Image (spheres, helix red, strand yellow):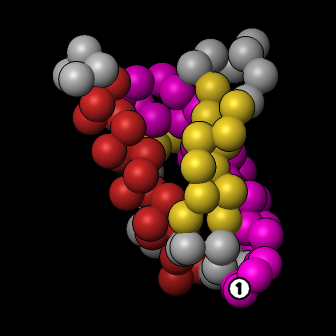
Amino acid sequence: MFDTRQFEKINPQYFNIIMLSEHDVTVQSRNTGHYWYLHNTDYPSEGNCVIFHKHKASHPYHLHGRAGTLPQAVRSIKKHDKWQMNGRK
């Protein structure tokens, strides 16, 4: 499960926070406008999450990757944003 301590890693100046719950987080990057859905599976251990991504609200999500913790997922999103803003280089 995600907890409030982990939610503090989601900077509201960087992300538009759409939804936070113990198993699901949905945010929008203020830099790229991309949407991110993080699902905490609690399997094989507590805290593991699957990262889904979409470019526009009307698009379907696609699998972006996995992370061991919510802070790791946030770092992955920021890395993707940097790559996107640098012309995908």
Q: Quadrant of residue 49?
A: bottom right
User: Which quadrant is the N terminus positioned in?
Assistant: bottom right
Left or right of 58? Residue 4 is: left
- Residue numbers of the magenta segment: 17-46
Query: Going by the image, does 20 lie left or right of 71?
Result: right
Q: In screen coordinates, is 40 left or right of 78?
A: right
Instruction: Please tell me whether mark 1 sits on a helix, a strand or a loop.
Output: loop
Residue at image coords 32%, 44%: 79
Q: In which quadrant of the rendered image does the C terminus lie?
A: top left
Q: Quadrant of residue 60?
A: top right
Q: Residues within 10 Å of mark 1 (few under 14, many from 20)?
A: few
Residue at (26, 34) in percent of width and height: 82
When asked about the image quadrant of residue 74, the answer is bottom left
| Residue at image mark 1 | 46
In this rendering, position of residue 75 left or right of residue 67? left
Q: Amino acid at mark 1?
A: Glu
Q: Residue at x 78, y 78 (%)?
A: 43
* Position of residue 54 measured from the top left corner of the image (x, y, whole percent): 63, 26
- Residue 16: give x, y in percent of width and height: 52, 40
**In front of the other: 2 or 51:** 51
Indicate whether 58 appears above or below 28: above
